[in-house]
Structures are given as C-alpha cells and as structure tokens.
Image: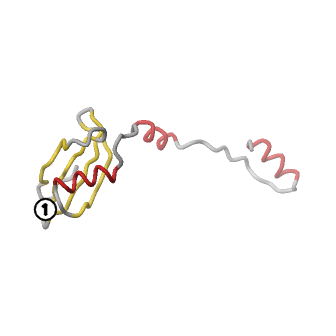
Amino acid sequence: MTSIKLLALVAGLGLVAAPVLARPNAEASEQSAAKPAAKLTMKQAETIALREAPGRVVERDYEKEDGTWRYSFDIRQGKRIHEVGVNANTGKIVESAFEAAGDKD
C-alpha cells in the first residue's frame, strides 16, 4: 500500500498520521549484491577447514581476498589460533597459518 493511500485510509478513520516511506536499506542490498553465491556452503567449507586444522571454530567469514571469494575460519587449537582459508568454489585450502597473539584481520 502506498503512503498516499495509507494516509487517505488513516484520514478516513479520523486518525492523524504522517506518511512513512519505506526505503530499502541500500547498505544491506549492496553487501548482499557484492557477495556472489558460492558453490560450497559455509558448513561444507568448515568441514574442510577442520580436517586441515582440528579444533573449535571461533570465527568464520565469507570474504574476498586477493580477488577470490573464500571462507575464512579462525580455529582455536589450545592457546593458539589457526587461520584456514577455503576457496568458496573449489574447496581448495588457500591459507593455513597460525595467527600471532593479538593479531586481528
């Protein structure tokens, strides 16, 4: 229902209201449009990452790095964090490295 029709309906009921225009969240739509669908699901990529570095996933992300879309997992192994990157389309491990204490992506 358009805001003009809504205003007329509300006015017909004897109520006073200001029209509210619904605008799609541009930032959210840009983010979803900017992230293409991957061939692998996050869960499939997580399984691959945990085979590479067993532990507990403490952070996961779907990101573009070096021109390629990938899933990135921070996996806690005792007192250290093992970062594993999995290509979102091929399932290939593209990164497997330990983060230094206090490192932030």
**Residue at left offset 22%, top offset 49%:** 105
Q: What residue is shown with label 1?
A: 80
Could you say where residue 15 lies in the image, as x and y percent from the top left? Answer: 83, 56
Q: Quadrant of residue 2?
A: top right
54 or 73: nearer the eye? 54
**Residue at left offset 47%, top offset 41%:** 27
Q: Quadrant of the N terminus?
A: top right
Q: Is residue 56 above or below residue 51?
A: below
Left or right of 65 in this view: 99: left
Badge 1 density bin: few <14, some 14–19, many ≥20, Cα 10 Å: few
Could you say where residue 98 lies in the image, as x and y percent from the top left? Answer: 12, 53
93 or 102: nearer the eye? 93
**Residue at left offset 14%, top offset 54%:** 99
Label 1 sits on a secondary structure element that is: strand
Left or right of 1 in this view: 81: left
Could you say where residue 36 lies in the image, as x and y percent from the top left? Answer: 39, 37
Give the residue type at disc 1: Arg
Q: Is residue 45 above or below residue 76?
A: above
**Residue at left offset 80%, top offset 43%:** 5
Left or right of 15 in this view: 49: left
